[in-house]
Image (cartoon, helix red, strand yellow):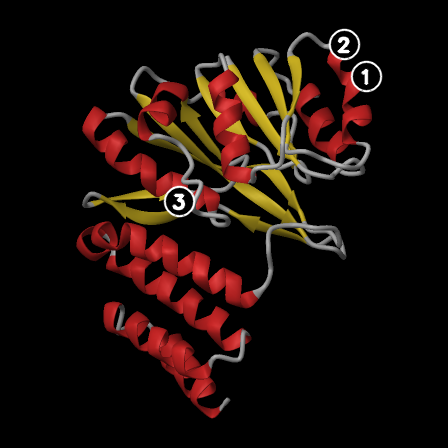
Amino acid sequence: MFSVIIPTYNREDLLPVAIESVIRQTCPDWELLIIDDGSTDGSEGVVQHYLADSRIRYFKKENSGGAQSRNFGVSLAKGDFIVFLDSDDEAYPHWLETAAGVIREDTGIICAGANRRLLDGTIIEEPPYAINVYGEKVKVKFTAGSLFIKRELFLESGGYDMEMPSGLQSQLGYTLLPYLHQSHLKIVTIDQCLVQINIHNGQRARTQWGELTVDCLRFVNKFHPYFEKWDRRELSNNYTVIAFYNYKAGQRKPAMSHLVRAIRYRPQRVSNYLRLVKYTLG
């Protein structure tokens, strides 16, 4: 059975789409846990009529952030595999059935692709991408809805780091890797887009460039030893992102400093030299 966990905060207008996308699954073997992180809008009322389905449970708690809400949801879950769905996104009807079809005895996590729907209706496909996992190239995607996790593995790893206010899925993915490696569980990749990330004008994750810089640096520092040894390409990619955040925040000197780090770890990436010229000229 799958435990689908939807953490939510003040999304009364968007939440029904996420819930109904779970109800429409072609695979009936699921439970849905809606974790309300202290909403002050009408979210609780919106959820009530869905509770006639015994597979759906609703929990409202004091506001404590997305990481704690997700960990709390897992503590209540009963399914063999955990999957998170953001309350402003939606799953396609074959989402769970497709994942169920690839599970084997040694499956630890499953990674699938996602479609990103922009405000103008444009759909951008985001398939799994290759990273180096202890010397082996594996295609992954660590985003909500794309990442299915064996429940015991999640619990053993400790789950989400509550000191990481953003980038939660990437943090979780890299936290899981050593536990996968030690237990000899496998990563299974599905080269299909099974969920839709909906871009909207409402509140999403924080978009302040300075805050994003701090969060991304925290992520890189936490996993730096792993990246340094096993995936310098991904380390370079993260420094490129940090440089961009600094540039957008008007911090040219840190932007160039992090871009130089990105070049050092991946000198063959020509686009970073072009960025360096751009950031230097302002």
Q: Residues within 10 Å of mark 3 (few under 14, many from 20)?
A: many
Between the residue at mark 3 and the residue at mark 2, the CA separation in whole angstroms equals: 35 Å
Q: Which mark is residue 171?
A: 3
User: What secondary structure is found at the residue carrying circle 2?
Assistant: helix
Relative to the observer, which residue lies in front, 259 or 107? Answer: 259
Q: Which mark is residue 52?
A: 2
**Quick check: can you spot residue 128?**
no
Work out whether 184 lies above or below 135.
above
The residue located at (42%, 27%) in the rendering is 149
- Residue 94, by quadrant, is top right
**Quick check: can you spot residue 280?**
yes
User: What secondary structure is found at the residue carrying circle 3?
Assistant: helix
Work out whether 239 lies above or below 176.
below
Between the residue at mark 1 and the residue at mark 2, the CA separation in whole angstroms equals: 6 Å
Residue 195: x percent and y percent?
60, 36
The residue located at (30%, 56%) in the rendering is 221
Relative to the observer, which residue lies in front, 72 or 276? Answer: 72
Q: Which residue is mark 1?
A: 49
Question: Do labels 1 and 2 touch, CB within 8 Å?
Answer: yes
User: What secondary structure is found at the residue carrying circle 1?
Assistant: helix
Residue 89 is left or right of residue 278, and the answer is right
Residue 25: x percent and y percent?
65, 20
Residue 41 is left or right of residue 75, and the answer is right
Amino acid at the residue labelled 3:
Gln
